[in-house]
Image (cartoon, grey):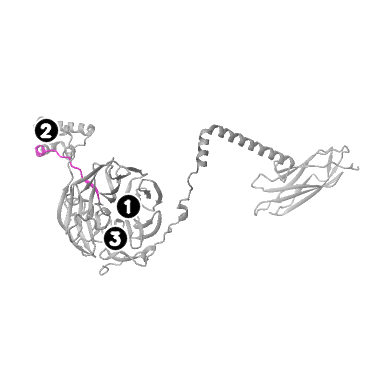
Amino acid sequence: MSSGSQELKDTSVASSKWLDAHYDPVANLYTFSSCIALSDLHGDGENKLVVGDLGTGVCNMKLKVYRGTGLLSESTLLDLPTGLVSFLMDLHEPRTPAIAVASGPFIYVYKNLRPYFKFTLPSLEVNPLEQDVWSQAKEDMIDPMTLKEMLEGLRDKAEIPLSVRSLRFLMLEPQEMENFVLLHKEQPIRRQTVITCIGTLKKNMADEDAVSCLVIGTENGDVYILDPEAFTILYKMSLPSTPTLMDVTGQFDVEFRITVACRNGNIYILRRDSPKPKYCIELSSHPVALVRMGKNVVVGCTHETLHGYTQKGKKLWTAYLPAPVTTMALMDLPTRGFQAVLVGLANCEVHMYRDKNLVSSIKTPDVVTSICFGRYGREDGTLIMTTKGGGLIVKILKRTAVFDDRDSAPGPPIAQSIRLNVPKKTKLYVDQTLRERENAVAMHRAFQMDLSRLRLAAARAYVKALESSLTPMSASLTEPLKMNAVVQGLGPSFKLTLNIQNTAACRPVMNLAISFLYDENLYSMRTAFFKIPLLVPGLNYPIDTFVECLSDKGISDIIKVFVLREGKSAPLLTAHINMPVSEGLALN
């Protein structure tokens, strides 16, 4: 497969995990992930690449088949393909799969690369008022302008939408209406829907080579399951909006689950024996791509996010992406037991996610529009991508490649997303919950009362601490100071020692002073005001002074100490010193 291919320079971290098998920037392949499949068309054990090419959007729509790096065959399509699947439609030998291409209201079935069958969607109910209006035009009872007014009134009020013929008529200029009426008035009115998405559902067995039914979603919100042999409608389900993306799992005869993303921005889950959606997932933004990984559903949204949900619609995780999502595909390696989601981004990168963990990334030369992973040729781990410019990229996963479960992107560790083993609710817990519900008001009042008592006790303790001056500390964050006082002596002369400490981390404190306030009738001090030297953080500075008691009545009082900044009147620190009772009288 690598012969004649161009080397693709990949500077990403994950380049060592992939072999660059083929790169053709001018392959002229314009398609999406829904229109690409890998299938063993000839039963020889060698898978081919089948692509529904959109061409220019107006012409050159083709069904192309690649073998290796070369184009094997191509067939012209009459309309734009909206989806392409490979499925086994019978048990006949040899077991060669068929290709079903959804295009407009038709499904074209190819077998052995030749047209085999064409299925047409059933016609929808036509508005009887619309039929009556066109019957009047057929009998020349009304002119084209009157016909236009009546159809516009029906379009605005009728519950059944107008047919394509009436809608085209309303788009015409006045001078073109008469010719249009003459051309179409003899033909019966038909209202036809179109196919928007397609998938496959195993009939009664889960084997890889089991017969599969076709599942199609239509513009009018219906989902049909078709018989693989007779192509009759086996089952019909309805959705509130038009389906755009589809993922199918299970067996039709046993149990199946169809996950559908709709145009209204919601995801609906359909189950067997339920014609209406069983579950609904409301997204914060419109879905761009949808992939099922195991029992979970991974959705890429327009707001550059990736969401994981259970099959019942419960949200599991969210991953934020560096660029908008362009396409997604499942990477499944059954031989290694490894599954991941490949996400194509608008910044020319393809990210590989396992749950919400980014395990690898690939740099591409252009924006990727479609991704397909599986067995190509005889190689199991082949990654096929098409780009916005029409290029084709083929990479092969190395057999020595190992992907870590840990997230390669910066962020919280994986352990943070592991659920805690929360024990089940005990009978005691349930009884307490019931008691709280029944006595909520009384319990709240008791809580408020206890809280008020706690606040009162804290306030009293704070006032007591201030009055007793137990290790006063500065409340200012800019001047963190701590001071305690020690009184020595029996009287009438006392030695007063102040221990001051700077509690800052690394900044010294300077330009401070200490002032004493006392009753001059009871005490006298040798120095009642003096400056404090520079305080180095962490060191204790003792400052001594002497106090003389002047009274002989055996009474004592409080001496207040103020630590001030020079030039400012507000104290930085205040302390109250309870002086002891003097045992004698000072001598004058």
Q: Amino acid at mark 3?
A: Gly
Instruction: Please name which of the two marks, 2 or 1, marks the residue nearer to the observer.
Output: 1
- Tell me, yes or no, whether the two marked residues, 2 and 3, touch with CB atoms within 8 Å: no
Q: Is residue 94 visible to the viewer in this orientation of the structure?
A: yes
* Residue at numbered disc 3: 374
Q: Is residue 11 visible to the viewer in this orientation of the structure?
A: no
Q: Earlier in the sequence, mark 2 or mark 3?
A: 2
Kind of element beneath mark 2:
helix
Q: Amino acid at mark 1?
A: Val
* Residue at numbered disc 2: 135
Q: CA distance from mark 2 to mark 1?
A: 48 Å
Region of the chain picked out in magenta, as a range: 182-199
Q: Position of residue 419 (x, y in %)?
A: 46, 51
Kind of element beneath mark 1:
strand
The image's mark for residue 457 is none
Q: CA distance from mark 3 to mark 1?
A: 15 Å
Q: Position of residue 370 (x, y in %)?
A: 28, 56
Instruction: Please name which of the two marks, 2 or 3, marks the residue nearer to the observer.
Output: 3
Q: Please tell me how many numbered marks the rendered image carries.
A: 3
Q: Earlier in the sequence, mark 3 or mark 1?
A: 1
Q: Amino acid at mark 2?
A: Ser
Q: Reply yes or no: does residue 332 show up in magenta.
A: no
Q: Is residue 97 left or right of residue 464?
A: left
In this view, the residue farthest toward the front is: 427
* Residue at numbered disc 1: 291
Q: CA distance from mark 2 to mark 3?
A: 56 Å
Kind of element beneath mark 3:
strand
Query: In terms of depth relative to the viewer, which is nearer, 9 or 454?
Result: 454
Q: Residue at x 81, y 48 (%)?
A: 545
